[in-house]
Image (cartoon, grey):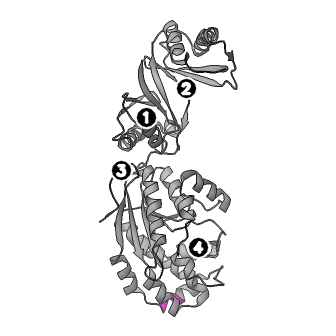
Amino acid sequence: MKRLIVIHYSELGLKKGNRDYFEKRLCRNIDETLEGCGAGKVRRISGRLLMEFQADSNLDEIKRRLGKVFGVAYFAEGWVGPWNLEELCVAVWEILKDVPFKSFRIEARRADKRFPQNSMEVNRVVGAYVQVRSGASVDLDHGEMACRIELVEGRALIFFDRINGPGGLPVRTGGKVAVLLSGGIDSPVAAWKIIRRGCSAVFIHFHSFPHTNRESQDKAKQVAALLAENQGRSRIYMVPFGEVQRKIMVETPMETRVIMYRRFMMRLAETIARKEKARVLVTGDSLGQVASQTLENIDVITRTVQMPVLRPLIGNDKEEIIEVAKRIGTFEISILPDQDCCSLFVPKHPETRANLRRIESIEADLDVTEECRNALAASEVLVQYPAYEAGPVRQL
């Protein structure tokens, strides 16, 4: 029997008139992700995708990469069986005869009404055939082995163990965003969440080298490379922020410094975002988590830019964020020691309820135009490749 991988999506099925666009984008993303694995082109059929592969294909790598593709709800290795119930019974047993199991269930779905028997009858007939030959018991709720049969477009698709995908929407269906990526736990999770909603992201990392070490830059690059497995090759801006910070430290009240840092980071990020034709900025803010993320401070910081700012983690607590970070693989990178440009220069008692008029009054006497211009001019622009591509980090 012909071997293939059956790929299911969930959210795309609700897109109605735009479904064709989303399906095509998902197919293209899968094809690009699986390039070099020996996988065939993905084909669309009735609410699911099929991908054939050869005997010498790297099936483990195919499954690993598929598990990173946003838009995939789940997938399974399968077979194309005969379009006849008696022959289908034989085909199912041929696959199962060398597999040990004590209980099982058959789950059939008849999407193509041209098949003579309905789903219930397929379940009953195939289940009886397997039970007689295996001696295993039928358990419809907790069967040790679940055999799934989908009757669709003249095919009987047979598969067993389903592998969950990340869900969400296909990358590049939701527009482009610019993510402020620190060396901490939160911003990589925020980036992952917004990419999962179909956006493609360009990353912006602010550092204070040579006033600090390079660890935060290395961490940002590692995170960008990891997220590139979800969205493909990713661009990251490494922005030297030390001279801007130095000027702020010298010429502004101590308690307002964090607010000032973040306001100028937002301004610089907006400039980069417009250059990249990104529509919004994205941060890892979680309401009330640190001093700069109180409601008042978020308001004052945000008012410095005209571009919308999205905060995917705004209602999450730290434990929830850490749980996601561990699941997506960024946590171990984020907890590596580093000298973050903000945390290193943060005052002991930062402002928690900033007043916009006071902040704007202080800024009126602060001229960092040259420092900001130099920071943008000195920024490194790197391309991070996903791990499965051989390309090194490349500077543009």
Q: What element carries label 2?
A: loop
Q: Is mark 4 on a helix, strand or loop?
A: helix
Mark 4 burial class by Cα count in 10 Å: few <14, some 14-19, many 20+: some
Q: Which mark is residue 59?
A: 1
Separation (CA) of disc 4 from disc 1: 49 Å
Q: Point out the residue furthest to the left here.
A: 396
Separation (CA) of disc 4 from disc 3: 41 Å
Question: Residue 296: where, in percent of width, then height?
Answer: 63, 75
Q: Which mark is residue 299?
A: 4
Q: In which quarter of the image is the C terminus?
A: bottom left
Q: Amino acid under label 3? A: Glu
Residues tagged 3 and 1 counted as in contact (Cβ below 8 A): no
Question: Residue 192: where, in percent of width, then height?
Answer: 51, 55
Residue linked to disc 2: 160
| Residue at x-position 45% and y-position 12% | 83
Mark 1 burial class by Cα count in 10 Å: few <14, some 14-19, many 20+: some
Q: Amino acid under label 4? A: Asp
Q: Is residue 126 above or below residue 340?
A: above
Residues tagged 4 and 1 counted as in contact (Cβ below 8 A): no
Q: Give the range drawn in magenta.
A: 362-367
Q: Is residue 16 above or below residue 275?
A: above
Comes first in the chain, label 3 or label 1: 1
Residue 317 in view here: no
Q: Which mark lies nearer to you, 4 or 1? A: 1
Comes first in the chain, label 3 or label 2: 2
**Is 263 in the magenta?**
no
Comes first in the chain, label 4 or label 3: 4
Separation (CA) of disc 4 from disc 2: 51 Å
